[in-house]
Amino acid sequence: MPLRRIKPLEGIIAVRAVLADPTKRVETDDEFKTAVRYLLEELMVLRPGRSVEVRVPPLGAIQCIDGLTHRRGTPPNTVELGPLEWFALAVGEVSWESLVASGKILASGTRADISDALPIWR
């Protein structure tokens, strides 16, 4: 099982707090940072593997999705987006397609489309 750094209860509380108070959606808010990291970890737990790297700078990065394992250097399948976009995507407020179309997701590689794993929070 992938290593968690955020305790599940702590992460759930943070996600609920951010959903309840949109003013918390800033990179300097501790609950927002915890919620973003927790949702990344949830993706890692729900879709374990090492074939895709999901990056949400500056808050975190994980490897997920079963398939060819990446071990060194730049992964062949990467997804990068901002914390606000990741949170909205992970909780189902926006779609993968809309973020790709608007250029807010940078995805490269044949396995980089992780839309079938989203939303995480239901």
Image: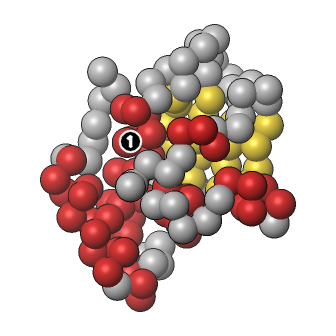
Q: According to the image, label 1 marks what residue? A: 41
Q: How many marks?
A: 1
Residue 106 location (% of width, % of height) = 76, 50
Crowding around mark 1 (Cα neighbors within 10 Å: few <14, some 14 to 19, many 20+) is many
* The one of 87 and 29 positioned closer to us in this rendering: 87
Quarter of the image with the C terminus is bottom left
* The one of 116 and 13 positioned closer to us in this rendering: 116
* Residue displayed at 59% across by 46% down: 55
Establish if 4 lies above or below 110: below
* The one of 35 and 92 positioned closer to us in this rendering: 92
Q: Seen from this angle, which residue lies furthest bottom?
A: 23
Q: Seen from this angle, which residue lies furthest left?
A: 9
* Residue displayed at 74% across by 62% down: 98
Quarter of the image with the N terminus is top left
Displayed quadrant of residue 3: top left
Residue 35 location (% of width, % of height) = 35, 61
17 left or right, relative to 45: left
* Residue displayed at 47% across by 78% down: 26
Establish if 89 lies above or below 39: below
SS type, badge 1: helix
Displayed quadrant of residue 36: bottom left
Displayed quadrant of residue 52: top right
Can residue 30 be seen by looking at this rendering? no
- The residue type indicated by label 1 comes to Glu
Establish if 66 lies above or below 30: above
